[in-house]
Amino acid sequence: MKKLSVVIGVALATLASVAHAEYPERAVKMVIPYGAGGATDISARTIAEPLGNAVGKPLVMANVTGAGGATGSVSVQNAKADGYTMLFARVGSHSVNPAMKATLPYTLDDFRFVTVYEINPVACAVTPASGIKSMDDLIAKVKEGGVSYSSSGVGSLLHLAGAMVLKEFGIDNPLEAAVHIPQKGGGAAATAVLNGTATFLCTNSSAVAGFVANEQLVPLMVTTPEPVVGFDAPTANDLGKPALNQLVGWTGIAGPDGLPDDVAAKWGEWMAVATEDAKFNETMTSRGSVIQLMNPVDANEFIQTQYETFRQLVDDLGMRIEG
């Protein structure tokens, strides 16, 4: 009887230990909703080592691609809200897509953001051969006609960015004033400008930093309030267009709606450590990124404001994609 009591006691102690086990007990799956080599993938894999060290458990990086980031996002939306499946959310998947696409299978309310940690300013750029040296020059050319801009596809951030920039600079109907030339990805969009297929593009600074450094592209403007390292160009605020500060790329981390408070708090602690890593900062800054760690409240407010700005633009210009 005494032996039985000991066995029962050990079992109960084991159950209590399991019930109060501290998160995380095992590896965490980190879904990247875009393909290898893109801005989201690079950001995620660059922070993976310092973040994994902070978490203390393996991070299993998984590219779950398709539908402009929607496929990977849905896989996290439908996951158990226990912190073991998290998402590297992106401006395309969680600001542009909700604003542009009427049939998106999720809303912002389906996720709990634990942080936004990286801002990618948008830079508008042309080739030296274009003869365009400023935003004033570009707008004058648009008014003359025959100007085009490239993007990474219909409904992408680049598509929206070209229209938003022209509208802010006084072009009443940018969808008719400049021809949109969609490409298959951001790299192809930059190539279209380089080879003269398109006049200009407005894209994440990280996508054109190398071309700017090699003097293959000339930056006309960056959309942040402060200058961007490596870009000798005025800011949107310098040009009197502070509304364009909302036009930025970003990377954040989210779990399904219902993620527990204590789990969300842990991610805040881990990201505070990971984003201080010198190698991570050096790598991302060299690509034109701005490391800016936001707490959950600030992150959600930032994303919501950006979404509302984009949605208003989409409604004003009739850009909403119904299919």
Image (cartoon, grey):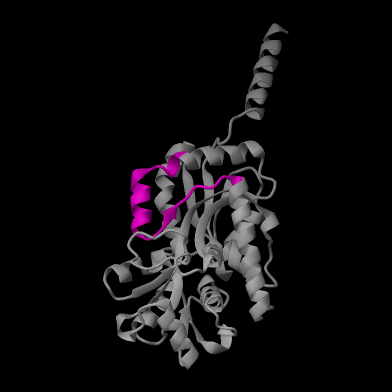
**Picture coordinates of residue 76, whole percent (x, y):** 62, 54
**Is residue 318 in the magenta section?**
no
Q: Quadrant of residue 164?
A: bottom right
What is the magenta range?
273-296
Quadrant where the C terminus sits is bottom right
Q: Residue at x 67, y 77 (%)?
A: 316
Which residue in the rendered view is the most extreme toward the left?
A: 214
In the picture, measured across the screen, residue 1 lies left or right of residue 175, that is: right
Query: Is residue 198 something one can see in this rendering?
Result: yes
Q: Quadrant of residue 212?
A: bottom left
Q: Residue at x 33, y 47 (%)?
A: 279
Query: Is residue 320 something one can see in this rendering?
Result: no
Which residue in the rendered view is the most extreme toward the top?
A: 2
**Picture coordinates of residue 129, whole percent (x, y):** 30, 85
**Picture coordinates of residue 253, whole percent (x, y):** 55, 51
* Image height of 303 relative to 128, above or below: above
* Image height of 248 relative to 24, above or below: below
In the picture, measured across the screen, residue 119 lies left or right of residue 255, that is: left
> Count of labels shown?
0
* Image height of 182 relative to 261, above or below: below
In the picture, measured across the screen, residue 255 lies left or right of residue 61, that is: right
Quadrant where the N terminus sits is top right
**Picture coordinates of residue 183, whole percent (x, y):** 47, 80
Q: Residue at x 63, y 24 (%)?
A: 17
**Is residue 295 in the magenta section?**
yes
Which residue in the rendered view is the most extreme toward the bottom?
A: 145
Q: Residue at x 44, y 77 (%)?
A: 201
